[in-house]
């Protein structure tokens, strides 16, 4: 070690010490660090910390440590929280003040690390450095020894946001943060359509929502990948059959599944146990549990769900329709490649609407304006006992710093409706290559997709808390299976053969049908239209859509 390196290390260590002494100027700085570090780490892991347990942790003689803990309580850094209704015993929690100071300290540490090791790319702030990133071997850029600026069009959800932030290899080998365009679902659909109309694609890789696959493949907007799948090292047998099939249209592979998410009924395990209520497995049991746990006066509602006009309520309706054993399309007709006519079965539709009306009675005010984010936030902040949500988004319950429900949630498949069965609706995205991408970039795009979906990469994301549906070769990793209760839930429902993607059939007309259903069902829920009339209107409009399609084909 030369003098220059020695001085740089000393400077780095000083940069780490100064933020701590600035945030926590108390005497006995080492003991303060040990006590606060122990408290925050233990609480973050879901452990209960009592004052005696913290004092006995071994960082100082008991009386000295106990006195210091009491000082930290008086300074407002540690809060006493009653453990029982009698208030006779307490647990210790980091106070709001401590959380704020500690987060500020950690940001300073990240900044020091990023400035020393190098930030992510030109124009990126040091605090954008992701401390959990780890190099993942085998990327095309790394193998070929040079950087490729691949351009991605992805969904703006917690998976793709995390992908953008944490994949150091992806960003250094494939491009910078500026090469990622993230968009919410409706905008993502429009951007992907607009890109397909360009002479040359603006993106190398696009994320396609599973129900859009039929439209993008049938209209020639994305390239078939069947001939290059195995050459790129992609083995269909590595994936669950239902998962792999999400990237197919008419028996041809057009996309690679990047992640599979399942709509779950997430319930507050602690509230159910306190009330001695069993977990629901039917519509009626959901309603009964929701009524029992509905406490608006205390800021808690029985359930929250996606009921906003358009895509959110349309998806909710179709999933619940599937729970009743009814689907828009007959699977056999689709498999036989016959002309299709989607049908909303009237009696099943009425049963679903009746259930949705009754859900509203135990939901937060304004639930008919709730999209995925609003509904998720309501449950995450402790204001609902149950929620229908995607398993990928549910990862925030366990890892979001604002979450009030971490380690208190049980993840269930969709309860059965009348004449139906328990199901696990599939959602997620596939990665596809635009048809108008220049040929010379095609192979690099496919190699990038293969690397992104490789077992090592999937394993890395699972261990980082992202509950993707893994390849079979990843499932045997004990660390992976222990990484999240959601990972275990997804694996359980897959093994029980509950996965089903047919609630939202991936036909070319799906998005247009979804828009119709999202309007008519919402009108029924807000009382603008009677239930039967709304279903009949939706059916007429869907029939007109397909008649128009047939007349255009005949012309």
Image: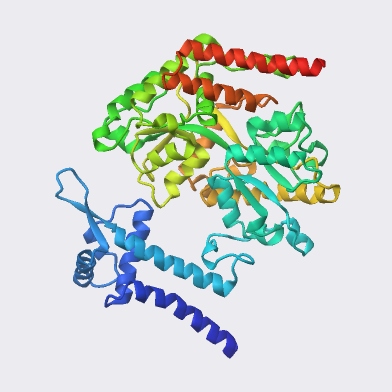
Quarter of the image for the C terminus: give it.
top right
Q: Is residue 405 above or below residue 47?
A: above
Whether residue 346 is visible here, answered yes or no, is: yes
State the residue lying farthest toward the bottom. Answer: 3
Q: Residue 549: x percent and y percent?
A: 73, 18
Residue 51 lies left or right of residue 451; in this view the side is: left
At x 46%, y 42%, the residue is 485
Q: Is residue 201 above or below residue 335?
A: below
Give x and y (percent) for residue 355. 42, 19
Image mark count: 0
Q: Is residue 497 visible to the viewer in this orientation of the structure?
A: no
Q: Is residue 117 left or right of residue 285?
A: right
Locate residue 444, reporting x and y percent.
79, 51
The colouring scheme, among rainbow, by chain, secondary structure or one colour, is rainbow
Say which quarter of the image contains residue 212.
top right
Q: Where is residue 8, by image quadrant? A: bottom right
- Percent position of residue 351, x then y: 45, 14
Q: Nearer the viewer, residue 27 or 441?
A: 441
In this view of the protein, which residue sits in the foreground, 526 or 423? 526
Front residue of 38 and 329? 329
Residue located at (57% from left, 42% from top): 184
Image quadrant containing the N terminus: bottom right
Looking at the image, the residue that sits furthest to the right is 439
């Amino acid at each position: 070690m030369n003098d220059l390196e020695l001085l740089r290390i000393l400077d780095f260590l000083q940069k780490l010490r100064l933020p701590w002494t600035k945030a926590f100027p108390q005497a006995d700085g080492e003991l303060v660090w040990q006590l606060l570090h122990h408290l925050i780490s233990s609480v973050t892991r879901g452990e209960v910390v009592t004052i005696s347990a913290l004092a006995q942790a071994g960082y100082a003689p008991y009386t000295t440590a106990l006195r210091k803990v009491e000082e930290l309580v008086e300074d407002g850094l540690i809060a006493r929280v009653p453990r029982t209704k009698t208030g006779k015993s307490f647990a210790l929690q980091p106070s709001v003040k401590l959380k704020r100071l500690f987060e500020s300290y950690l940001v300073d540490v990240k900044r020091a690390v990023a400035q020393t090791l190098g930030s992510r790319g030109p124009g990126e702030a040091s605090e954008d450095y992701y401390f959990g990133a780890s190099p993942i071997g085998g990327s095309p850029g790394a193998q070929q020894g040079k950087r490729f600026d691949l351009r991605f069009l992805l969904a703006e959800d917690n998976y793709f946001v995390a992908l953008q932030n944490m994949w150091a290899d992806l960003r250094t080998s494939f491009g910078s943060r500026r090469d990622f365009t993230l968009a919410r679902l409706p905008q993502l659909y429009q951007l992907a359509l607009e890109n397909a109309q360009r002479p040359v694609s603006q993106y190398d890789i696009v994320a396609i929502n599973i129900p859009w696959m039929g439209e993008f493949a049938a209209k020639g907007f994305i390239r078939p990948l069947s001939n290059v799948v195995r050459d790129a090292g992609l083995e269909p047998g590595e994936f669950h059959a239902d998962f792999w099939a999400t990237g197919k249209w008419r028996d041809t592979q057009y996309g690679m599944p990047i992640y599979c998410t399942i709509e779950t009924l997430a319930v507050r395990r602690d509230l159910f146990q306190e009330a001695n209520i069993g977990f629901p497995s039917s519509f009626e049991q959901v309603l009964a549990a929701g009524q029992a746990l509905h406490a608006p006066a205390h800021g808690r509602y029985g359930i929250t769900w996606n009921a906003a006009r358009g895509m959110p309520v349309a998806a909710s309706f179709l999933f619940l329709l599937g729970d009743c054993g009814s689907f828009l399309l007959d699977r056999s007709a689709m498999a036989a490649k016959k002309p299709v006519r989607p049908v909303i079965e009237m009696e099943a539709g009425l049963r679903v609407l009746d259930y949705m009306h009754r859900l509203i009675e135990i939901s937060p005010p304004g639930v008919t304006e709730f999209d995925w984010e609003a509904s998720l936030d309501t449950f995450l902040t402790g204001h609902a006992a149950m929620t229908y949500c995607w398993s990928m988004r549910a990862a925030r319950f366990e890892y979001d710093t604002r979450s009030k429900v971490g380690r208190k949630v049980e993840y269930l498949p969709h309860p059965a409706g009348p004449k139906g069965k328990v199901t696990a609706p599939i959602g997620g995205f596939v990665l596809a290559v635009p048809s108008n991408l220049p040929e010379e970039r095609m192979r690099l795009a496919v190699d990038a997709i293969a690397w992104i979906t490789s077992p090592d990469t999937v394993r890395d994301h699972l261990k980082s808390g992202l509950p993707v549906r893994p390849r079979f070769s990843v499932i045997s990793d004990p660390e992976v299976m222990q990484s999240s209760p959601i990972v275990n839930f997804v694996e359980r429902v897959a093994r029980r053969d509950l996965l089903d993607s047919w609630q939202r059939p991936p036909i070319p007309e799906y998005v247009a049908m979804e828009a119709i259903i999202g309007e008519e069902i919402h009108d029924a829920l807000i009382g603008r239209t009677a239930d039967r009339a709304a279903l009949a209107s939706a059916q007429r409009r869907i029939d007109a859509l397909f008649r128009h399609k047939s007349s255009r084909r005949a012309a």
